[in-house]
Image: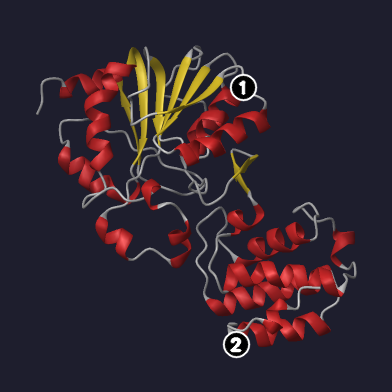
């Protein structure tokens, strides 16, 4: 029984009071979901790590604590749960509500392109709108009648972008590069979990350092948060590795290097997909000569640009 919520010598007093009531009075799965939604709504949590509302987060956390599928069948909702199970749920909710820990770090799972990926605090939680481009096979920028042979996921983190590409392009070799050994351990776990070890490879690399040869597709979701945005991020984001977020005053410290080097690693008909988020005005201002294409996303998100290899030829010889 998880009575530490009550006995904790340094509790969040308000949460502990409500949790003590819930521990004694609530009875069913639906009771716990409803209670969690109410508490989350009252606490004003930030939702930006795979969900945008307290209902989905409550459902994920309650189902996870009970070892149930998150798509709960209706017949489970009225199931009675034991006192110790209620304690397990409340302990998890305390971390989310009081500790502001993002839900995927608590469950160890984040969904990307309709598939689950293992995540922990060594990597960013997958949420890139690039997933929509993968699902559309990068049309119309990559020819629909051609299969890319080599794909690079640069600054891979959990590996979700590269692995999703491997699912979409079944004959492609995919390299996952990241400077962080910690992140690569997570990526390697996901490679194994998805059974793509024969054609997806994780390599430690400072940007393109470990890349070899040329790629048909280079996709990158690098650190791009500028200094102003870093200073006002919601508390939930401070659980993510700063190395994967912060990128200098304009958010483009790594992007400047990538744009100078990317052409050397692209095939002549290659495509470079780059996410810069809120730093997109700074990117456009820094490179007025580049014909950035900015896709519009049906499921939300912004700040992803597409460039062709020939576009990057414009940077050859520039300072």
Q: Where is residue 73 in the image (x, y as percent from the top left)?
A: 84, 55
Mark 2 neighbour density, 10 Å: few (under 14) some (14–19) many (20 or more): few
- Vertical arrangement, residue 207 with respect to residue 86, above or below: above
Q: State the separation of the CA atoms marked 2 and 1.
A: 49 Å
Which residue appears at 67% of the width and 25% of the height?
A: 195
Q: Is residue 182 left or right of residue 105?
A: left
What secondary structure is found at the residue carrying circle 2? helix
Q: Is residue 295 above or below residue 66?
A: above
Instruction: Determine which residue is flagged by label 2.
Output: 13
Image mark count: 2
Residue 174 point in image, percent of width and height: 50, 21
Q: How crowded is mark 1: few (under 14 residues within 10 Å), some or many (20 or more)?
A: few
- Residue 30 occupies which quadrant of the picture? bottom right
Who's the residue at 53% across and 16% down the image? 172
Q: Which of 207 and 280 is in front in this view?
A: 207
Front position in the image: 302 or 87? 87
Residue sitting nearer the eye, 283 or 136: 283
- Left or right of 135 on screen, residue 177: left
Query: CB under 8 Å between callouts 2 and 1?
Result: no
Visible residue check, residue 141: no
Mark drawn on residue 197: 1
Q: How far across and down, in percent of the image, does residue 89 sit?
A: 74, 68
> Residue, x 62% and y 43% (percent of image)?
118
Q: Earlier in the sequence, mark 2 or mark 1?
A: 2
Image position of 27 with respect to 145: above or below? below
Which numbered circle lies on residue 160?
A: none
Q: Is residue 44 visible?
A: yes
**Element at badge 1?**
loop
In the image, taking residue 128 as reference, residue 224 lies left or right, namely left
Instruction: Give coordinates of residue 192: x percent, y percent.
Output: 65, 29
């Amino acid at each position: 029984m998880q009575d530490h919520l009550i006995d904790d010598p340094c509790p969040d007093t308000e949460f502990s009071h409500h949790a003590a009531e819930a521990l004694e009075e609530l009875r069913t799965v639906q009771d716990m979901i409803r209670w969690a939604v109410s508490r989350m709504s009252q606490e004003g949590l930030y939702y930006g790590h795979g969900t945008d509302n307290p209902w989905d987060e409550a459902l994920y956390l309650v189902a996870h604590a009970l070892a149930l599928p998150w798509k709960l069948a209706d017949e489970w909702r009225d199931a009675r749960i034991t006192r110790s199970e209620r304690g397990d749920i409340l302990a998890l909710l305390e971390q989310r509500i009081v500790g502001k820990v993002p839900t995927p770090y608590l469950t160890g799972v984040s969904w990307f392109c309709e598939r689950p990926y293992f995540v922990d605090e060594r990597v960013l939680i997958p949420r890139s709108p690039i997933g929509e481009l993968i699902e559309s096979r990068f049309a119309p920028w990559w020819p629909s009648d051609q299969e890319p042979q080599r794909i690079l996921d640069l600054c891979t983190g959990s590996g979700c972008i590269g692995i999703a590409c491997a699912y979409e392009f079944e004959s492609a070799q995919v390299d996952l590069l990241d400077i962080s050994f910690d992140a690569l351990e997570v990526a390697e776990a996901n490679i194994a979990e998805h059974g793509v070890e024969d054609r997806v490879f994780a390599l430690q690399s400072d940007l393109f350092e470990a890349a070899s040869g040329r790629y048909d597709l280079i996709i990158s979701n690098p650190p791009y948060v500028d200094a102003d945005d870093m200073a006002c991020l919601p508390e939930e984001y401070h659980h993510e590795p700063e190395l994967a977020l912060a990128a200098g005053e304009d958010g483009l410290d790594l992007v400047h290097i990538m744009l100078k080097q990317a052409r050397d690693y692209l095939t002549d008909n290659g495509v470079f997909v780059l996410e810069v988020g809120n730093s997109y005005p700074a990117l456009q201002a820094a490179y007025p000569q580049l014909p950035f294409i900015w896709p519009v996303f049906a499921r939300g998100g912004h700040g992803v640009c597409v460039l062709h290899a020939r576009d990057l030829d414009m940077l050859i010889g520039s300072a």
